């Protein structure tokens, strides 16, 4: 509510000040027109009336009638001053002193326009629109003043969420505005967006941004949102790049969004580069974003960078110390070919995980270092915890660990369990044959020696 009132006060003050400038400028221009024409005679021949277009002749005729009596001029200035001071009661009291019946068309138009601004300040929006429409209907305003009033009406409609009326009024405005600016196109885009006319909204937003030398951040955000709603990722990307170039402190959300856009277009190197830039600015504070940075680093063969990100994030507590985090850290060490460093995080991941798969992964790392007893312990923990994707693989690995621990009989029992799985049967049978031959050889040797 406070924001809406502050915005309304700014609009009323702006409208009043614009009216003041336009009014004074027009009076001064009329007074100086004679001298300017004389000064220009030595430079270029003035155009004859017959050379003017019909519209130009009509405008000249109207301009000649735009006069304000000294009394009414004084009243209008008083009303304007009260309006700028937000003293709407006194502004209304002042403007009431103008005799509408005796006023000419221009004076009536200025009076109704002032009444419209006063009503707007008083939050009497329908009344404000009525007065402003009456000001236009007097047909006394200059083309630029006519356009200004229409824009004020459109702004009021937008503030009331009357989007169809706003669009219709803005179209009127575009028909009379000499050089439509960015703000008008953006306002039109917003209205179309609210009406769910995304094609028209996108067209207007594009024009608004294109006209601006340095588009405002909300304008770029609107254009970006429209592209994203329509899933125009390739067109959204340069908009987002420009937004972050102009407003690098726009927030982590936009950096993450840009990385996501590059990812959707399978440009992983750029996605990683954007996340790195955001990380260096300390913008990545959420768990999911830090994991994404680590994962992308891994995908681009940068495992040590992944390790550094995870370790720092766990230490700062920005990343939750869960099984997935420790598994990612362990895998990063493995891909960095430092499997010994992978053991502690994988052991912690296995402990935290509700299933036994990570104990299986830990056992594989331990087996690489021929730590058969520790590997067997990890495998038994995997079997005990359960939930293994392929239990027979644990049976086979237990057989291998016991065999290398010089316990062939125990190894054979695990290979026998493993062969119940069709997937592991060939490998298990091979090991069983090898052990049987070995055991038979041992028996033969024992018999011979006996």
Image: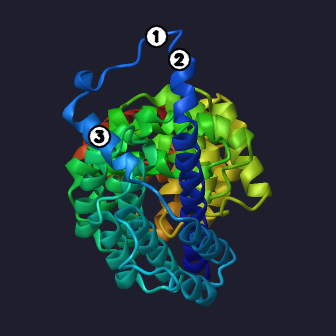
Quick check: 14 left or right of 147?
right
Q: Are marks 1 and 3 in contact (CB under 8 Å)?
A: no
Quadrant of the rendering where the C terminus is positioned: top right
Which of the two residues, 341 or 398, is positioned nearer the viewer here? 341
- Front position among marks 1 and 3: 1
Tag 3 residue: 232
Question: Across the whole image, how many numbered discs are drawn on residues?
Answer: 3
The tag on residue 40 is 2
Residue 113 vs 424, above or below: the answer is below
The residue tagged 1 is 44
Any mark on residue 323, and which? none
- The picture places residue 190, in percent across and down from the top left corner, at 35, 58
Local packing at callout 1 (Cα closer than 10 Å; few below 14, some 14-19, many 20+) is few
Quadrant in which the N terminus appears: bottom right
Check disc 3: other Cα within 10 Å, few if <14, some if 14-19, many if 20+: some
* Identity of the residue drawn at 61% across and 36% down: 246
Q: CA distance from mark 3 to mark 2?
A: 54 Å
Discs 1, 2 touching: Cβ within 8 Å: yes
Q: Secondary structure at mark 1?
A: loop
Nearest the camera: 338 or 300?
300
């Amino acid at each position: 509510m406070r924001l809406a009132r502050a915005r309304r006060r700014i609009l009323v003050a702006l409208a009043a000040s614009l009216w003041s400038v336009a009014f004074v400028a027009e009076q001064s221009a009329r007074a100086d027109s004679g001298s300017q024409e004389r000064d220009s005679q030595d430079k270029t021949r003035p155009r004859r009336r017959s050379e003017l277009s019909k519209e130009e002749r009509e405008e000249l005729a109207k301009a000649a009638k735009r006069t304000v009596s000294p009394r009414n001029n004084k009243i209008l200035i008083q009303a304007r001053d009260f309006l700028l001071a937000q003293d709407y009661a006194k502004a209304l009291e002042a403007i009431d002193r103008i005799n509408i019946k005796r006023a000419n068309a221009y004076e009536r138009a200025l009076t109704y326009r002032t009444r419209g601004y006063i009503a707007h300040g008083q939050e009497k929006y329908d009344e404000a629109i009525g007065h402003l429409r009456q000001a236009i209907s007097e047909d006394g305003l200059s083309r630029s003043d006519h356009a200004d009033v229409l824009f004020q009406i459109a702004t009021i409609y937008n503030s009331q969420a009357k989007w169809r009326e706003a669009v219709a009024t803005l179209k009127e405005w575009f028909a009379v505005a000499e050089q439509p600016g960015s703000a008008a196109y953006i306002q039109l885009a917003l209205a179309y967006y609210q009406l769910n006319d995304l094609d028209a909204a996108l067209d207007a937003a594009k024009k608004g941004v294109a006209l601006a030398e340095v588009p405002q951040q909300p304008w770029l955000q609107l254009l970006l949102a429209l592209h994203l709603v329509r899933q125009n990722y390739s067109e959204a990307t340069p908009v987002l790049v420009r937004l972050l170039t102009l407003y690098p402190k726009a927030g982590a959300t936009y950096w993450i969004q840009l990385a996501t856009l590059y990812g959707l277009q399978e440009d992983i190197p750029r996605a990683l580069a954007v996340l790195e830039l955001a990380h260096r600015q300390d913008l990545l504070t959420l768990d999911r974003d830090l994991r994404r940075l680590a994962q992308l680093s891994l995908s681009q063969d940068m495992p040590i960078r992944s390790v550094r990100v995870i370790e720092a994030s766990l230490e700062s507590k920005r990343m939750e110390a869960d099984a997935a985090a420790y598994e990612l850290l362990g895998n990063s060490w493995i891909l960095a070919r430092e499997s010994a460093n992978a053991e502690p995080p994988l052991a912690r991941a296995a402990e935290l995980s509700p299933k036994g798969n990570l104990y299986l992964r830990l056992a594989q790392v331990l087996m690489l270092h021929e730590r058969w007893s520790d590997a067997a312990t990890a495998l038994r923990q995997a079997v005990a915890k359960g939930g293994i994707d392929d239990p027979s693989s644990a049976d086979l690995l237990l057989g291998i660990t016991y065999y290398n621990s010089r316990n062939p009989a125990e190894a054979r029992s695990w290979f026998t369990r493993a062969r119940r799985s069709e997937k592991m049967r060939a490998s298990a049978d091979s090991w069983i044959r090898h052990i049987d031959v070995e055991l038979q050889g041992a028996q033969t040797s024992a018999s011979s020696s006996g």
